[in-house]
Amino acid sequence: MKLSVADRLALTDLVHLYAAAVDDRRFDDVAQLFTDTAELRLPDPPRHLEPVRHHHGHDGVRAAMAQLATIARTEHAIVGEVYAEGPDANYALGRITAIAHHWSVVDDEATDLIWHLRYDDEYLLTPTGWRIHGRALTINAIETRPVRRLRAHPSTDRATDADPSAASTAPHRRKTNPRGRFRDTP
C-alpha cells in the first residue's frame, strides 16, 4: 500500500516533533512519540557507532533521554527524510539523516560534539496517530569543535520551565508588537 501525502506529512511532523522535544528536554513528550512496545536502539560512542544498546517502551526511551541531562544544550537538524510503505496501511519505514550538536561546558570552556547520524525507523499508526515503533541510531561521523559562546538552555534561565516535560510540543508563542510597529512608535 502506497503512503498518502497526509501520512507522509504526519510522519515528517513526528520526526521533527521528536527533534524539537529532545532539544527542549521534554523527555516525557519524547517517550509519548513512541509506541508502548517500541524499541530504541542506540550506539555507544566512540567505541561503537552502530546501535548496540536497546531500550524498550516508554520507560526505556525516558531512561535513554535522561543521559542528555548532563549536556548543556542540544540541537538536532533534520537534513533528509525518506519514507516507504510497509506491508500494510498501519506500518511505514523511514530513513532520517540528521546532524546533532551536543554542547557541553567544562571549566568555562564550551565544546560542540557533533554527530552526523542516521535513524532507521519503523512507524505504527495508532489511534492517536503515527508513532515510532522502532528507531535505530547509527553515527556516520563524530566531530569536536571549540565554541566561543553558548546560550543557556531555556529551561535553566526561566523559572516557568521548571518541568520542561510538561510543556507542549507546539512552538512557543512570543509576545510581539503589532505588525510593522516598533516599540517606540506611537
Image (cartoon, grey):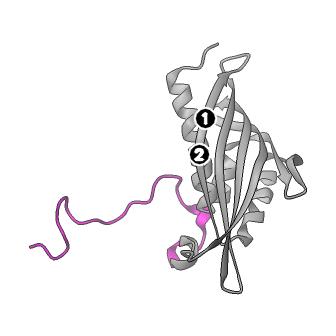
Point out the stretch of residues depicted in magenta: 159-186
Quarter of the image containing the N terminus? top right
In magenta segment, residue 162: yes
Crowding at label 2, few (<14), some or many (≥20) Cα neighbours within 10 Å?
some
Which is more toward the observer, 159 or 118? 118
Q: Residue furthest top?
A: 1
Query: Looking at the image, can residue 128 be seen?
Result: no
**Could you tell me if the residues under marks 2 and 1 are in contact, i.e. CB atoms within 8 Å?**
yes
The amino acid at mark 1 is: Glu
Q: Which residue is mark 1?
A: 81
80 relative to 40 in the view: left or right: left
Task: Left or right? Give the position of 136 relative to 146.
Answer: right
SS of the residue under disc 2: strand
Instruction: Tell me the SS state at disc 1.
Output: strand
Q: Residue at x 17, y 65 (%)?
A: 181
Tell me which corner region of the image, top left, top right, bottom left or bottom right, holds residue 22. bottom right
Residue 45, x across and y down, in percent? 84, 57
Residue 102 in the image: x percent, y percent?
Answer: 68, 64
Is residue 59 among what the camera can see? yes
Residue, disc 2: 78
Which amino acid type is shown beneath numbered disc 2? Ile
Image location (x, y in percent) of residue 131:
66, 37
